[in-house]
Amino acid sequence: MTTYLQHYINGDFVAHSEETWIDVINPATEVLLSRIPQGTAQEANRAINAADAAQPAWEALPAVERGRWLRKLASAIRERVADLTNALVAEGGKTHALAHTEVMFTADYFDYMAEWARRYEGAIVNSDRANENIFVFKKAIGVTTGILPWNFPFFLIARKAAPALVTGNTIVIKPSELTPNNAGIFAEIVHQVGLPKGVLNLVYGYGPEVGQALASNPKVGLVSLTGSVGAGIATMTAAAKNVTKVSLELGGKAPAIVMDDADIDVAVKAIVSSRVINTGQVCNCAERVYVQAGIYDRFMTALIAAFKAVKFGDPAEQAEIDMGPLITAAALARVEEKVATAVAQGGRVVLGGKRVGTKGFFFEPTIITDVRQDMEIVRDEIFGPVLPVMSFTTLDEAIALANDCEYGLTSSLYTRDLNNTFIALRKLKFGETYVNRENFEAMQGFHAGWRKSGIGGADGRHGLEEYLQTHVAYLQLQD
C-alpha cells in the first residue's frame, strides 16, 4: 500500500488540495516508496501566513525556553532513529552507516544550537558624546524559509530550522521532492512534542512553484537554500523584488592538493572517503586531485587499490558497503555523459567508468587520468563517484590550478610541512580548507562558500547570526 504524505501547516497535517502527486522512488530498486503532494503557491503562502502569525509570540518567549523546545526535538529524533535511518537509506540510497550518522548528527545539532540560547548577544558601544549610551540589539528577522536538497535532507532541516527557531524566528520548510519521507517523519515529531502551532511548517512540491513562492513572499525575511547554482540564481531573482535576505549553499568543485612530503596512506584514505561518501553526491566532496610529480606514481598505485576496494550495492540489503546508487536515472545519465566527454577530450579511464547492472542507478568508482585543467571533468561539478587526477610541480602551480574554478566551497591539502600549509591557507580561495583529513565540516565551524558556491553560511556562531538582524539604539541621558 502506497503512503501518501501531507503538508504540515499551522500545527496540523493538511490534505492536498489538488489531485497531482509526486512519486518518490527508491534509487537502488526503482520501486515506488510514497507519494507527496505537488504543492502550490497557495499552500506555500498559507504556511507563510501561519508562520507570520505565530512569530511574535514565539519571539516573545525567553531564548532559553526556545532552546528547551529544540532539546525536545533532539530527544524525539533519537527515539525514532531506526525509522529515520531506514527512510534515508530507502529514499536517498545512503549506506546504513551514513544514514545513521546523519540522524544522530541532526539530533546533536538541535542540542548544539539550543546551547546558544544563553550565548548570543548584542553590545554596548562607547559614544563620542557625554551622557550617551549606544546599544546594539540582536533581534529575530521574522519569518524564514528553508529550501532543502536531497543529499543530506534530514540534517539540512536542523541546519536551517535550529538557528532560526532558537533566535526567535519561525520557518517554512520545503523538502526535496526526491527525499521527502524523512521530513514527513520529522513533521510527526514536531506534532508529537507539541511545538506551538505555526512555528515550523512543511510544504512539499517542486522548486519552480513552491520554492519560488517561499522566496518571493513579502512576509519572508530570510530565504535559505541549499542546492544547485541554477536554483540559487532563481531564488535570488525571486527574493530580489522584496530585497529579501538570502543565504545560499550551492555547488562545489573541491581540489585536493597532495604534496611530495604527504603521508600517502593518510591522503588516499581521506580522499577516497571524501569522494565516495554518499556516492560522491556531496557539495564539499573532493572533486579533483593534484599530486606533486615526485610521488605521483606511488600515489596512483595506492589510490587505484583503494578505489578497487570500495564496496557498493543496495544499502538496504548490504550493511558493509561504502556507497549506494546515484539518486536518479537523470543523475546516472549525467555522470555517464561526463565520463564519456572526458574520454573524448583525451582523458584515460584507469578504473571503472561504467554503469553497473540494469536495475537501480549504480555507477562504478571511477578514476580518470591524463586530464587537463581546461577539460570539463576538471572544471564542472561531477556529483558522482568519479575522480580526475593530474600532477603538478610546485605548490604555487597547484594553488593556481586549485583556484582556477568558478566554485569556492571546500579544498584540502596533504603535507607535513607547516610552512607550505600556511602558504596554502593564505592563498587558497575557498570557504574551507581541510589539512590531512577528509572533507567533512564541524557543527561549531562555519560552512560557507566563495564565488558561485554561495552567499552567507551555516553552523557555529557565524551561522547563527545569519538569522539575526541588528537594531542600534542611541540613548542620550538628560541631566
Image (tube, rainbow, N blue to C red):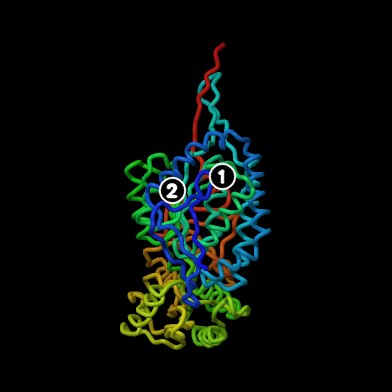
Residue corresponding to mark 2: 223
Q: Position of residue 19 (x, y in %)?
A: 39, 57
**Looking at this view, is 415 or 87 the one in front?**
87
Q: Position of residue 329 (x, y in %)?
A: 40, 75
Q: Neighbour class for label 2 at 10 Å: few (<14), some, many (≥20)?
A: many
Q: Is residue 287 above or below residue 124?
A: below
Q: Who's the residue at 40% across and 68% down the image?
A: 400
Q: How many marks?
A: 2
Q: Nearer the N terminus, badge 1 or badge 2?
A: 1
Residue corresponding to mark 1: 165
**Looking at this view, is 388 or 80 the one in front?**
80
Q: Is residue 386 left or right of residue 241?
A: right
Q: Position of residue 340 (x, y in %)?
A: 35, 83
Q: Who's the residue at 41% across and 87% down the image?
A: 349
**Looking at this view, is 470 or 317 the one in front?**
317
Q: Is residue 256 visible?
A: no
Q: Give, as a three-letter code, the residue at label 2.
A: Val
The secondary element bearing badge 1 is classed as helix
